Amino acid sequence: MYVRLADGAELFYTVDDYTAPWTQPETIVMHHGMAKNHRFWYRWVPVLAAQYRVVRFDMRGMGQSSVPEPGYPWSLTHFADDLLGLLDQLGLAQVHLIGETVGGSIAMHFATMHQERLLSLAVCTSPVTFGTHHAASAELIDREGMTAWVASTIGRRLDPQLTTPAYRHWYAAQMAATPAHVVSGFQRQAGGGDLRPGLAHVQTPTLVLAAANVPGEVLGDFRGAANLFPNGRLVLFPGVSGFVQHLLPVPCARAWLDFAASLHP
C-alpha cells in the first residue's frame, strides 16, 4: 500500500495487526534507518503485533518508495516532514514511534517538532550528532558503489558470533539495493547536524536501546541519548557488540513492551 505526499512522492507501507478484533489497539510506527527498508523489522513484528497495530514503511528513496532524482535536498527535517505526511494520510493522531540508526535520529528530530503526535518514542543505536565520517562514506559510495560501502560497514553492524552467514548476506544485499545517489546525497548533507539542543524540551517518554559497544565507534554517544530527554531511559545489552536492534530483535521488542506497559501502570 502507498500514501501520496503533498509533493507527489509515494511512500510504501504495510500494516501488521493480530490484536483481538473487539479491541482498539494503539498504533506503533516503525522507522528504519539509512539504506534499509521496512523488512528489517521482521523479527520485531510477531512480538509487537499481538498487542499493537504495527505500521512499517519505507523511507523516501528506499525500499518500494519513490526515489528522488540526484540533487534532492536530503535532511532530517525533510524526512520528519515525510513522517508527518504519512501519519496525516493514515489518520493517525498519536502513535508510538520506534526508530533505528538514522531512523531513530529522524524520530528524535520529529519529536522536537511534533511531540503532540507521540505516545512514546524509542530509538535504537541512533546518533544525536553527525560527524565527518559521513562525507568519507559518501566519497566511498561515489567511488566504489553501495556494495563496497556496505562491506566496509557490515562488521560494526552485525557481530558474526550472533548472526548467521545467510542473515548477513541478506542484510547486506538489502542495503546494497538502495540507489547510491540517495545514500551518498544524505551522507554529504548530514555532517555537522546536532540534535542535542532540542531534546531537553521533549516530554515524550523515551526509550533508548543500545548494545554495550559498536566496533569503530562513529555514532557518537548514542547510549547517552537517554540522558538528554526529561523522561528518557536506557536499556543496555551488555556483552553485545553492534546494532542491537538487528542482533537481538526479540529481546529488544520485549524490552519495548515492558517500557510501554510502564506507561500505563
Image (spheres, grey):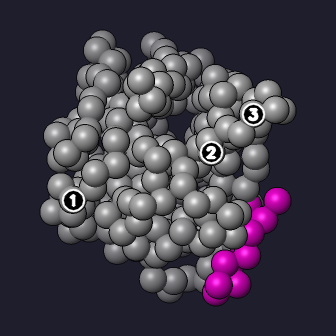
Question: Which residue occupies 73% across, 56% down?
Answer: 13
Q: Residues within 10 Å of mark 1 (few under 14, many from 20)?
A: few
Q: Judge from the rendering whether residue 43 lies leftward or rightward of residue 146; answer left or right.
A: right
* Label 2: which secondary element: strand
**Residue labelled with disc 3:** 23
- CA gap between label 3 and label 2 equals 12 Å
- CA gap between label 2 and label 1 equals 24 Å
**Residue 42 tag number:** none
**Label 1 amino acid?**
His
**Residue labelled with disc 2:** 27
Instruction: Determine which quarter of the picture holds residue 134.
Output: bottom left
* Label 3: which secondary element: loop
- Mark 3 vs mark 1, foreground winner is 3
Task: Please say whether residue 9 is one of the residues in the magenta stretch.
Answer: yes
* Label 1: which secondary element: loop
Mark yes or no: residue 170 visible. Answer: no
43 up-or-down from 40: above or below: above
Residue 51 % position (x, y): 66, 28
**Residue labelled with disc 1:** 201
Residue 43 % position (x, y): 64, 27
Q: Residues within 10 Å of mark 2 (few under 14, many from 20)?
A: many
Task: Please say whether residue 40 is one of the residues in the magenta stretch.
Answer: no
Question: Which residue occupies 33% across, 18% down?
Answer: 237
Q: Judge from the rendering whether residue 263 lies leftward or rightward of residue 232; answer left or right.
A: right
Residue 231 % position (x, y): 25, 41
Upstream in the sequence, badge 3 or badge 1? 3
Residue 185 % position (x, y): 45, 73
**Label 3 amino acid?**
Thr
Q: Which residues are magenta?
A: 1-12
Q: Residues within 10 Å of mark 3 (few under 14, many from 20)?
A: few
